Amino acid sequence: MNLARRPVVGVTGLPCSGKSFVARLLASGEVTGEPGLAVKADAVGHQVLNESEVAAKLAERFGAGILDAEGKPERRKIAAAVFSNPDALRWLEGLLHPRIDRVIAGMIAAAGGSRPLIVEAALLFAAGMEKRCDIVLVVEADREARLRRAADRGWSEEELTRRENRLLPLFAKVREEGCGTRCETIDNNGKNGLDGLKARLAEALVAVMDMKGQP
């Protein structure tokens, strides 16, 4: 791999694994010495939801009641519509994921310089965004740690289970088959402290950071 532009680092993991913390840490420059540009796929998803074409397709599928008074899709109503309907969820992902991927691809293409670009996405593999990355960091934490963090967010164990069940098969498949790009597992149970986490991240990133900017 020859990186003549900024390296793209994907950060993903199960809910409450701490992927947002890892992404912020990488973007701060505390790990590599170079502050990065952070992109949250969830924020891009909000942007995509407000596209008029997307709103029209959602209204056609779920009815006009899925929109607010201004004609914008309401995330709470969308979640309710797909919560126990796998077909509806697959349809929604088919509508949104390619659009999110295209937006992020455009951001990567437009980002000059050599600082790392950090793409944080729980659904990184589901949306096929791993192909945009030079390396994917899969942040992991055991169930007990994730339950504690879920409680801090006000989530019940049932809510955490609901959210993670959507992702578990994807991560299991990646562990068994790989993801087509370099993947590194990051233990974020907190047992080695912040310094230990920084050291592990630096170790994982050294290859892509060293290749950055080579002709």
Image (cartoon, rainbow, N blue to C red):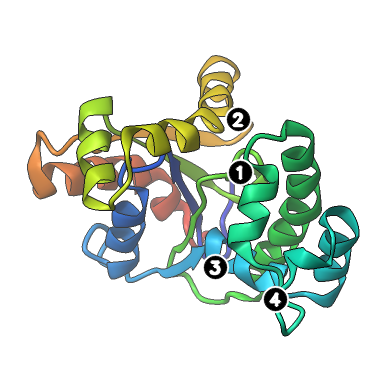
Foreground tag (3 vs 4) = 4
Circle 3 is placed at which residue position? 43
Q: Which numbered circle lies on residue 179? A: 2
Q: Residues within 10 Å of mark 4 (few under 14, many from 20)?
A: few
Q: Secondary structure at mark 4?
A: loop
Q: Residue at coordinates 44% horizontally, 67% vertically from top-left?
A: 38
Q: Nearer the viewer, residue 87 or 125?
A: 87
User: How many angstroms separate mark 3 from mark 2 (CA)?
Assistant: 24 Å
Are the residues tagged 3 and 4 within 8 Å (C-beta)?
A: no
> Which label sits in the foreground, 1 or 3?
3
Q: Amino acid at mark 4?
A: Asp
Asked if residue 176 is positioned above or below residue 58 in the image, the reply reads above
- Gap between marks 1 and 3, in whole Å? 18 Å
- Element type at mark 2: loop
Mark positioned earlier in the residue sequence (1 or 2): 1
The mark nearer the N terminus, 1 or 3, is: 3
The residue at which mark 4 appears reads as 68
Mark-to-mark CA distance, 3 and 4: 19 Å
The disc at residue 76 is none
Q: Residues within 10 Å of mark 2 (few under 14, many from 20)?
A: some
Mark sitting earlier along the chain (4/2): 4
State how far apart marks 1 and 2 are (Cα).
Answer: 7 Å
Residue 16 versus residue 140: which sits nearer the camera? 16
Asked if labels 2 and 1 touch by Cβ distance under 8 angstroms, the answer is yes
Query: Which residue bears the numbered disc 1?
Result: 130
